[in-house]
Amino acid sequence: MMAGQCEAAGFGVVPSGGCSDVVVIHSCAVTQPAEKEAFRLIRRLRRRVPPPFVVVTGCVTALHDAERFRREGADLVVAQADKERIAEAMRRLKVEGGKVEGKPPRPSGTPPQEGNQKATPYPLASTPLFFTTRGSVKVQDGCDFRCAYCIVPDTRGCAVSRPLAEILLDAEAVAKSHREIVLTGVNVATYCRPEATLVAMIRRVLALPEVGRLRLSSLEPGFAEKELADLMADEPRLCRMLHYPLQSGDDGVLNAMRRRYTVSAYCDALEYILSVVPAIGLGTDVITGFPGETEAAFENTRKTLERYPFSNIHVFPYSERPGTPAATFAGSVPVAVRRERAAVLSALAVEKRRAFARSWVGKSVEVLIERHGKDGTSKGWTSEYVEARLAGRLSIGELVTFTPISVEGETLAQSSSGRG
């Protein structure tokens, strides 16, 4: 969205890491290491000769005042709440011809000038610009859940759903150049507008003739997962993949985390989903070593994961996030134990992902071609989010159907190399 706005405003946009006069850092605050990375990037950019004009936005800007970023070397700070008008905030950089004027290094200790030049505001609405095979459409922002370990509600604010009309306009525009669209947001499950529920909104997007394939980002338990499973069973263009965060398989830990479901409720929903879409790809997130997690509680988590055919398990050893309630909780688990437990679940994740991939051998799958391999093959992902490798250099962005005859590691293949 920001790249699309900047391009519409006359800036030339290059892929991340390319040479440019202006660099925008879209910061993340979900963990303390991510927050530190934003400041590290600012300092690294200041060492370039000549240094680029550094713009910082994103969640970290909600946790510190602008002066902190200026001390590190940022030239312009666009608050998280204002980033949807980033091109307008950068208007003072625009000169005749739509180019960016070169900027000499700022002398040490000289504060950046915010500038008061008058300029025509750039339009807020512009087609998002992607350098990826998939295109994303944001459907909501913010979260009201206040999980004990999460800083996101403090940086993103309360949950807000985008109007259906805006979503449909974005989806229609993105679908013209991308065969797969991902509906995304901070807490997509809570999408609700007077004109549409979550499932109704998804049906309207699928009704657009340009949409080739539609994928959902992570979906919190306890909302519309059963209705979505019904829709997946009926609509082949809706990817049969559901990322369904568990976080812990122990009720005591879930309660301490301030999650809004029990293990039994989570499992009941999974049982229904698997009964409707038996071959669905199931993803989940799990935290090990949360304060108060005993060995028995960890075993409950391991057994829950072992029980179901998860194909994509993200495992995170707990890390204290300053500013969250959990950072002050008693019962801290030693870091070494957190990592040991994470290693156990990560090994289980590899086993289950490989088993899920093997279950597709001999069956027809649809693959979105995303890149070419050095060996002359084409690679991409199935609807169920299994990696696949096909013979020949097929068109990037093409949706193709093939029948894999082998699995190499976790990748479906058209030929057998003896590895599996």
Image (spheres, helix red, strand yellow):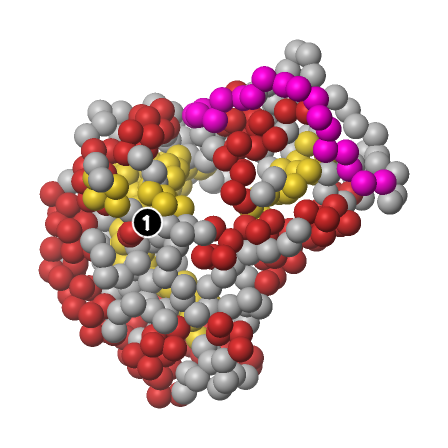
Taken as a whole, is the magenta stretch helix, strand or loop? loop
Residue 115 lies in the magenta stretch? yes
Q: Mark 1 points at which residue?
A: 188
Q: Which residue lies furthest to the top in this view?
A: 97
Q: How many marks?
A: 1
Instruction: Answer left or right for 273 relative to 336.
Output: left
Q: With respect to residue 35, does 254 lie above or below?
A: below
Q: What stretch is highlighted in magenta?
A: 110-127
From where the camera sits, is residue 340 visible?
no
Q: Which residue is drawn at 28% across and 39% down?
A: 214
Q: What residue type is labelled 1?
A: Val
The C terminus, quarter of image: bottom left
Instruction: Answer left or right for 279 relative to 182.
Output: left
Residue 274 lies in the magenta stretch? no
- Front residue of this view, candidates 77 and 359: 77
- Front residue of this view, candidates 303 and 200: 200
Q: Residue at x 72, y 52 (%)?
A: 68
